[in-house]
Structures are given as C-alpha cells and as structure tokens.
Amino acid sequence: MKALYFAWVRERIGKTDEHISPPEGVATVSDLIDWLSDQGEGYAAAFENKKTIRAAIDHAHVKHDASIATAREIAFFPPMTGG
Amino acid sequence: MKALYFAWVRERIGKTDEHISPPEGVATVSDLIDWLSDQGEGYAAAFENKKTIRAAIDHAHVKHDASIATAREIAFFPPMTGG
Amino acid sequence: MSLSAEPIIRVQKEIFDAGEEAAKLTQGRTDIGAVVTFTGLCRDEGGTLAALEIEHYPGMAEAEIARVAVDAAARWTLASLLVIHRYGLIAPGEPIVLVITASAHRGAAFDAASFLMDYLKTRAPFWKKQHARSGTDVEIGSAWVGAKQEDDAAAEKWGR
Amino acid sequence: MSLSAEPIIRVQKEIFDAGEEAAKLTQGRTDIGAVVTFTGLCRDEGGTLAALEIEHYPGMAEAEIARVAVDAAARWTLASLLVIHRYGLIAPGEPIVLVITASAHRGAAFDAASFLMDYLKTRAPFWKKQHARSGTDVEIGSAWVGAKQEDDAAAEKWGR
C-alpha cells in the first residue's frame, strides 16, 4: 500500500510518500494511524493530534473508521485550506 | 412642473415629457394621477390600473401619498424590469 | 461608508468587457481577497427573441444605482464596487448589466453582489421590451417585460 | 446531471485570466442569462506576506473538485461551470482560485458559485503556507494556514 503525506504531516514525517506494509489486524484508517505513530519520532509528531488528521483512500475522503482492506493509496493530511 | 413618462406609460400617453400645471388642490402623487387621467384617452389608458403605476419626484422613488408641493420633476412608469 | 474606493457607476449604450473591468478594479491592490462579478446577459428565449430594447430614466438611473451602492457599502465591508447597466438595443448573447464587488473576504463579496442585483432589478429605473424574431412589432412582435413577483421577493429578503 | 456542458476543471501552476475564461464559457451561447465569477486572490496581510505556497494532492484535487461540481450541477440548473485552482508559489495580488457558473437565471448562478467555493474550501485537498516578508523561513517566516471554523460552518449550511 502506498502512503502519501501532505502539508505539516509531510514535514513532520519528513517524506512525501512511501510503501507501507502494516501487519494483520490493522484494519481501519484509525488502526493505521496508531501503527504509523509507532514508526518513529516524526510519525508520532505528525499524528499526535489524531482527531485533526484527515485521510483519503484512492483519492476520496474517508473517515477514521473506514476499512483499508482494498486501499491501494492512502493519504494523510491536515484539514484543507485551499480556495 | 415637468412630467416624464416611461415604457408603456409613455407609449399610451404618446409623449416622453411635458410641462404640467395642475390646479390648486392637487397635493399628492395620487391626486396628480387622478388629474392626469382626465387629460385625455391616452392618459386614462396609461393610468387605468393606478396601483401598478410607480412615481419618482426629482429622481427618487415616492409613494402615491407623497406631496408634490416642492417637485420640479415628476416621473410616472411601470414597475422596473432592468438588471 | 465602509468602501475603500468610490463606487463606479455607469449607465451606457456601449457594450462592456466584464473581465477588463474586474482587472482594472483589482489592479495593483493587495488587500482584496475576493472578487465576484455578475454579468446579466440577453437570452434569445429559445430562438424567439430578436433583441431586447432597454429604456431608462437618465439621471435617476445613476442616482438610484448610487443609492443601492451606498446601501451595499453600509452592509458589507467592500474594497470596491462597480455597476454598469446598458440601455438601448441589445442582441441575444450580449451583456446587459455588470456588478463587481471586491472585498477581503468571499462572504461579503458574494452577498453584496447578490444584494445589488436584487435591488437593481426592483429599484433601478430600467424597462425591458422584447422584440420578437419574426413578425412585425405592431402585430405580435413587441412586448414590455412584466415585473416578476419573484424579483420583489428576492429584494425583500434583504430587509431594510 | 443538469449541466448542458461538461464542467471544466483545471489544477495548474500557471496564472489564469478570469475574464478570458468567462468569455470563452459564454461564447456563442444565447441561452445564458447570468454568469457569476468568483476570483480568490492572494492578500498581503497588511504587507506582512511575501508569498503564499500552495501544496496540493495531484489526482485527488481534480477528483474532489469534480465531485463538488457534480453536486452543484445536481442542485442547480447550470449551463456551464468552471473551476481553476492554482498551486505553487503565489504572490500577493495574484489570483488563486476561479469559479464560474452560468445559468439561465441569476439565483442559480449565485448560489452554485457560493456553494462551490464553500465546498472547495473544506473538501479540496489544497494547503496554504504563508511566507512572511522579512525574516527567514526557519525562524519566524513560514506557517501553515489553519483551517477556519467559519469555513466548515459555511459548507455545512448547504446540508447534504
């Protein structure tokens, strides 16, 4: 699965994207955030305020309880500030 | 006092403007409409549906009960359809 | 009046360029975050309309638009404001009216533009006559556009 | 989808010309009575801002704008619809986003444009970073713009 990071999530993690292989049992977006938070200091900082983190699976917004089972691409980012 | 007519009020009366000298006792816009209605067939036709007639004194909208005492220019027209 | 520039008001026979007017209004300014333009165009009513003829009350048209502009500037904080309204013969596809509002924030620009249009429709002394595509004016071809109740309702929703 | 033309959606680095885009959209059409354009511009925040940097999620940005456009076209009868959103470095005074809606009637054009902006603000994957005029990026100069609660409220008022 490809993970993408944007804005300050990207800055804190220190990369724009990477391939991740979460273990069995990581079923939802929420699970994945918790698992990523344990991957290092940058990840922990990026996801420290979990509620503010938005996620998208294959280019569509999803909630934290969404399943990641069929996801090819998952992105994490702060609330949008475009427009 | 100068009177101006617009749109179908103008077409029915058959002129764009004229100088009018209403008699004493013609005090309001409403009085003036009644007096004008007696000035000929065109005027009668123009003002037959009195409620639909809008008036302006010196370039500002007025109601039918407005005084014409200080009016230099009074205009009569149908509801506006610009924009 | 919370308007950092004089409102621009023009009543004219000539066609206008909405994009050019908007560009001029914002030129060199860095305090504007939002520009809304509204252009009202002449529709051909499914091919039946040859042209619109717009009659206006010179002098009062400008004065009434200015009053509406002052009203808008009192309600919203606007950086600038422009209204152009044409008169005379207008062909299908041509622009009739242009409203531009500029503000620091989008809400003010949207609301003020919408307000200006609603008020212009019901208060500015312009009258539209439709000229039909076929037939003569005398027989079937020409008719004054009636005022719409929905326009009164649109203006009334803003209160006074 | 009640849209007589495909929505035009562009996510680009290049500057755009709002007037030109609006002119192209209405060119040769006589069924359009109302065109509303919204241009969002980069403010200099009282002279403190050197530039905005806009990051976006390529692919999803276009997809999300398209979804918002489909939503708008389902709610209002629109003749055409255009959204351009820039990314990259943007100087004060430059345009960031353009929304154009065209309809037979003004209410639909105004409401759809306002709706599109409210939804783009909260749903389209763009993030603004401010670069301050003086000082270095590392020390004081650079900060991500925070999401505004008022933007969420603006989007929520349209319901689902």
Image (spheres, coloured by chain):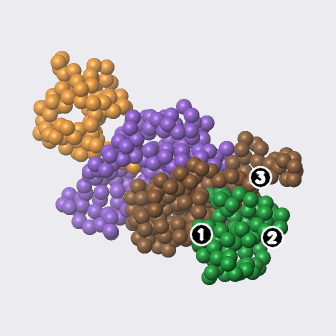
Chain colours: A green, B orange, C purple, D brown
Question: Local crowd at mark 2 within 10 Å, few (<14), some, or many (≥20)?
Answer: few
Q: Nearer the viewer, mark 3 or mark 1?
A: 1
The verdict on a common chain for dots 2 and 1 is yes
Q: Quadrant of residue C7?
A: top right
Q: Quadrant of residue D66?
A: bottom right
Percent across and percent down for residue B9 are 23, 42
In this picture, residue D30 sits left or right of residue D140: left
Q: Quadrant of residue A53?
A: bottom right
The Cα–Cα distance between marks 3 and 1, rounded to whole angstroms, is 30 Å
Residue closer to the observer: A73 or C79: A73
Parent chain of label 2: A
Percent across and percent down for residue D6 are 50, 74
What residue would you read off at disc 1? Answer: A65
Q: Check the image and name the residue furthest to the top.
A: B24
Q: Amino acid at mark 3?
A: Ala
For image coordinates 24% across by 45% down, the residue present is: B8
Residue closer to the observer: A41 or C108: A41
The verdict on a common chain for dots 3 and 2 is no
In this picture, residue C154 sits left or right of residue B39: right
Q: Secondary structure at mark 2?
A: loop
Q: Secondary structure at mark 3?
A: strand
Q: Amino acid at mark 1?
A: Asp
Question: Local crowd at mark 3 within 10 Å, few (<14), some, or many (≥20)?
Answer: some
What residue would you read off at disc 2? Answer: A39
Question: Local crowd at mark 1 within 10 Å, few (<14), some, or many (≥20)?
Answer: few
Labels 2 & 1 near each other (Cβ < 8 A): no
What residue would you read off at disc 3? Answer: D143
Parent chain of label 3: D
For image coordinates 27% across by 25% down, the residue present is: B66
For image coordinates 83% across by 49% down, the residue present is: D141
Position of B27 relative to C86 (above/below): above
Q: Amino acid at mark 2?
A: Gln
